[in-house]
Image (cartoon, rainbow, N blue to C red):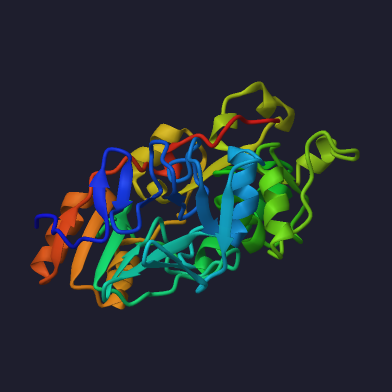
Amino acid sequence: MAAKEEDLVVARPEGLYCPPGDFYIDPWRPVARAVITHAHSDHARMGHAHYLAHTDSAGTLRTRLGSDIALQTLGYGEAIEHHGVRVSLHPAGHVLGSAQVRLEHGGRVWVASGDYKTEPDGTCMPFEPVPCDTFITESTFGLPIYRWPTQAALFAEIDAWWRANAEAGRASVLFCYAFGKAQRILHGVDASIGPIVVHGAVEPLNAVYRAAGVALPETLRVTDPGVDAALLKRALVLAPPSAQGTPWMRRFGNYADAFASGWMQLRGTRRRRGVDRGFVMSDHADWPGLQQAIAGTGASRVFVTHGSVAVMVRWLTENGLDAQGFKTEYGDEDDQGQGAATP
């Protein structure tokens, strides 16, 4: 499928570009105007002259990119018109403030998904299918092997692991990414099991979520008064993967550790991580979720960005849709360290 003259979004070296609107969506090189789907580092980069994002992304974007960025925000469903293109943002269910970008111009409607997840998790607005002619979708976990447990099943597993460790007198260290996944775990676990201690990279993002009205249980830092060896033996400890193997871990003594990621569905990945347990947990859609989301848009034309692009394009084509890949520089936060870790 070749690009068409009337396309509302085209691939350029700087990123995904909207020609009639003269702006980019999640560009990876500095541009004059950027619409940002969410604040993960591969989608929200430094150096743009103007940013447009959802209101709930303001805290994380300013924390990451600087308080002085030129940032304009919109609520979900709110629209602006720029060079004749009507732009609105709609829930993506990925992390706090994540948004799909709807573009309308000349009777055509395109939607760029950014990253998304279809099962609600209570920490951000649930994914909302947006009817469109053309849908630009991610495909991070676009293979049939990826199927996530339900929220209830996932947190029953995590709670049982934490409870068993607390009863055995050892800390439960759960490695997870500081933005999004850590807050989802905090929101979902049974906080009556014991105290919760978080790494210094996690707590500032907890504050952003709490300020947005997301209910999170009390969290402690290892340096807080009252946090001693006895408390840590019953604690759930949330830390970014970058903390694994560092001197920061020594204070937990004989601890059990685990990793939370969609990649934990693969036995080889679990083994390479070198942890006691793997919990299958992702903020991206699994294979059924991707199919459900794409079908929900009613789009007849689909562009696939990062992830399992070739497989997804082939599946869509075989199912009668006009599909092709968009080459991008988006990564996967499951594979990236998230910033400097402050113990």
Q: Is residue 193 left or right of residue 315?
A: right
Front-most of residues 256 and 110: 110
Q: Is residue 88 visible?
A: yes
Q: Is residue 103 left or right of residue 46?
A: left
Q: Residue at x 66, y 43 (%)?
A: 202
Front-most of residues 243 and 317: 317
Q: Is residue 143 visible?
A: no
Q: Is residue 13 left or right of residue 221?
A: left
Relative to 342, does residue 22 appear above or below in the rendering?
A: below
Q: Residue at x 61, y 60 (%)?
A: 56
Front-most of residues 297 and 169: 297
Residue 1, picture quadrant: bottom left
Residue 54, picture quadrant: bottom right
Measuring from the top left, give residue 129's x and y in whole percent. 38, 75
Q: Across the whole image, how many numbered discs are drawn on residues?
A: 0
Measuring from the top left, give residue 67's x and y in whole percent. 67, 41
Measuring from the top left, give residue 3's x and y in whole percent. 14, 55
Relative to 336, does residue 319 appear above or below in the rendering?
A: below
Q: Residue at x 48, y 40 (%)?
A: 48
Report the residue that reaches farthest toward the top.
247
Report the residue that reaches farthest toward the right.
225
